């Protein structure tokens, strides 16, 4: 049986399904779900099929996977079809945030330390999935995604619920001044340690969500550091360049 991390406040909505995958010693590549890191494609696709089977939905699901490039590019998904699920050839190109109001479409983010953020507007029935590494965080991709939800679907930020999934924490994310300088305006989240700095990307993304208009009570932090909990989650830093990736997902159910 696969184990998933889930957010408490998302689980209260009958219209929503979400999950964050974790490692499994029983499956190939410890249940990595990435097609872009050089593993045997057939085995990764089999892992993805196992994932779909265990998500708890008997209905057909359509998975959207993007070619993440640490950009601030956002794609609105309008069709009920899979992209990038069984092959890289039809993945959404050059994109780090996905938005949709189409039911049974699973928006996904692949990470191994970067910050995955899931968003849900229960009033307009809109969801989003965001990938925020330090470059995406510096570009405020999560705030731009909220703005796009408002522009396209008339979402109001105060209604949006957010989940910030497991990612590397300030305890383990040591960076040089070349990276840290972009976040000196967040003194609580960027602390000097000798000639290096300890950076708190999850909290910076939370700040950006609040600045975008979300209510702080509607933002749930996993408070899980991938490097500290490397037995459960892939960590590029801790595993010294691992090729494994876990997946954060969100979809709107088709209510009968």
Image (tube, rainbow, N blue to C red):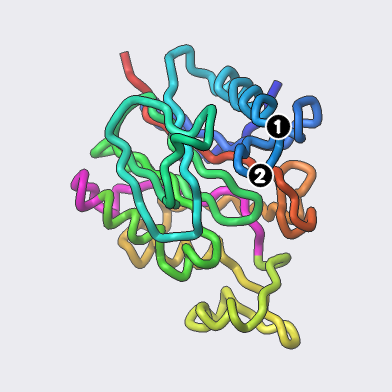
Q: Contact, CB < 8 Å: mark 1 with mark 2? A: no
Task: Give x and y (percent) for residue 111.
Answer: 60, 48
Q: Quadrant of residue 52?
A: top right
**In this view, which residue lies farthest toward the front?**
89
Q: Quadrant of residue 180?
A: bottom right
- Residue 250 visible to the viewer: no
Q: Which residue is mark 1?
A: 40
Q: Secondary structure at mark 2?
A: loop
Mark 1 is surrounded, within 10 Å at the Cα level, by few (under 14), some (14 to 19) or many (20 or more) other residues, namely few
- Residue 37: image tag: 2
Mark 2 is surrounded, within 10 Å at the Cα level, by few (under 14), some (14 to 19) or many (20 or more) other residues, namely few
Q: Indicate yes or no whether the magenta region holds residue 9.
A: no
- Residue 28: image tag: none
- Residue 101 visible to the viewer: yes
Marks 1 and 2 sit apart, C-alpha to C-alpha, by 9 Å
Which residue range is magenta in the image? Answer: 150-169
């Amino acid at each position: 049986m696969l184990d998933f991390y889930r957010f408490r406040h998302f689980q209260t909505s009958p219209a929503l399904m979400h999950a964050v995958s974790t490692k499994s010693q029983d499956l190939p590549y410890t249940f990595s779900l990435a097609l872009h890191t050089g593993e045997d494609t057939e085995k990764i696709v089999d892992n993805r099929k196992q994932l779909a089977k265990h998500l708890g939905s008997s209905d057909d699901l359509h998975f959207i996977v993007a070619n993440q490039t640490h950009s601030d590019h956002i794609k609105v998904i309008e069709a009920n079809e899979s992209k990038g699920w069984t092959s890289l050839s039809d993945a959404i190109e050059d994109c780090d945030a996905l938005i949709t109001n189409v039911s049974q479409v699973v928006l996904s983010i692949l990470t191994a330390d970067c910050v995955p953020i899931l968003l849900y507007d229960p009033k307009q029935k809109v969801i989003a999935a965001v990938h925020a590494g330090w470059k995406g965080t510096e570009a405020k991709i999560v705030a731009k995604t909220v703005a796009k939800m408002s522009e396209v679907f008339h979402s109001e930020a105060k209604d949006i619920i957010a989940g910030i999934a497991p990612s590397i924490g300030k305890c383990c994310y040591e960076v040089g001044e070349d990276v840290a300088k972009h976040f000196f305006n967040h003194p609580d989240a960027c602390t000097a340690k000798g000639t290096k700095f300890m950076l708190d990307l999850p909290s910076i993304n939370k700040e950006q969500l609040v600045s975008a208009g979300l209510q702080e009570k509607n933002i749930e932090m996993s408070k899980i550091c991938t490097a500290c909990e490397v037995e459960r989650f892939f960590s590029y830093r801790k595993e010294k360049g691992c090729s494994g990736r876990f997946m954060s997902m969100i979809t709107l159910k088709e209510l009968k």
